[in-house]
Amino acid sequence: NTDENLHCHELSSYSSCLEYDGCGWDRETEECFDEEPEDEIVNCYELVETNRCSEYSGCRWENITNECYDIMPKWIREGQMVPLTSLKSMLKEMEKYNSAPPVPEESLLNDNLFVVLPNCLHPEEVDMILAFESQLGPDTEKHDRNDDLEYHHTVHRIEPLLKQQQSTLFRILISTMIHVDKHLWNILETEHSEAVFPEVEFITYNASPKTGFAAHRDNGSLLTAVFMLSRESAFEGGELLFDGDRTVKLNYGECVIFRGDSLIHQVQSVTKGTRKVLQIELHQEHASEGGYDDGDDYDETNIHLTSS
Ligand SMILES: O=C(O)CCC(=O)C(=O)O
Ligand SMILES: [Fe+2]
């Protein structure tokens, strides 16, 4: 309600009732009633009991600290979802930072956008992902790139590990991508995807003159996100380059989200140290159906957009 003290039932006429957000008219009883807010906004931090916390799908209980946390990353916490206007201003910020020519307003929603989210991962979440390193080996290693792409890094497919061992984190990462997509492209809906097949990769670049990734598109990936796991001091080089001239140096914990199959991107050589990222691609088809990679039957499960 715009008026905090207003009670809908005090409004006796249909027209006065409908003037107020949050009031609805019951045609049978001819009464004005308080509508249930569509998405109840709760502050998870105020829920101090495990049970109360778990009643809310947007909250999760953290055993280490005994606190209830928002399931969404920080930048969504503020107001449930990022309104389009603030995404636009984030993009404007990006332009300044990239010193690229300004993107005209009407093309803000085009396929060539990328969005960088600060505080995408909490340091504890970075640690959870890095902890998988000890479980990586020949059976998780993947060579699914075209041979003509310069290929000087190691890729491990980790969606089974992530889903089984850190399922909450897995959901957070996917829902971050879905939220951004809803506001920017709505590609997951417009492509009539009832489900998407996430491919999760742990990618490590060790410094050498040729460690990087030549310009490419992520074939079949409706949406791609890259999460930075390394500290700024851990490596040099390794900038992402979009469209050949828009550079992004991701900071620790940041992520970039873009239309993988339409926006050309590349990774500059890592000249010093080690650069580690987590990459999630949301595919419309399972790899073995799409036939774009070597079809390892890593994981048949998908994410249903309507139910998750
Ligand atoms: O390492 C990155 O930042 C991006 C990697 C990438 O584009 C890919 O693996 O397709
Ligand atoms: Fe890529």
Image (spheres, helix red, strand yellow):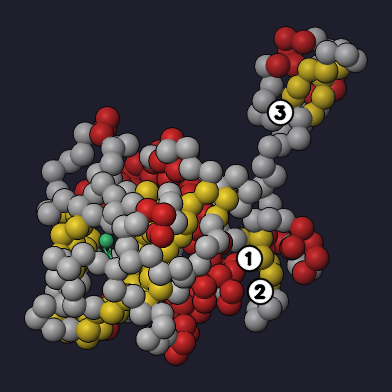
Say what amino acid the circle numbered 2 marks: Glu
Q: Position of residue 45 (x, y in %)?
A: 67, 63
Q: Is residue 75 visible?
A: no
Q: Quadrant of residue 54?
A: bottom right
Label at residue 216: none
Secondary structure found at label 3: loop
Label at residue 22: 3
Q: Residue at x 12, y 54 (%)?
A: 244
Q: Residue furthest right?
A: 29
Query: For ligand 2, which image quadrant applies?
Result: bottom left
User: In the image, is 265 to the left or to the right of 184?
Assistant: left
Mark-to-mark CA distance, 1 and 3: 27 Å
Residue to which mark 1 is pinned: 69
Q: Position of residue 49 (x, y in %)?
A: 79, 68
Q: Which label sits in the foreground, 3 or 2?
A: 2
Mark-to-mark CA distance, 3 and 2: 33 Å
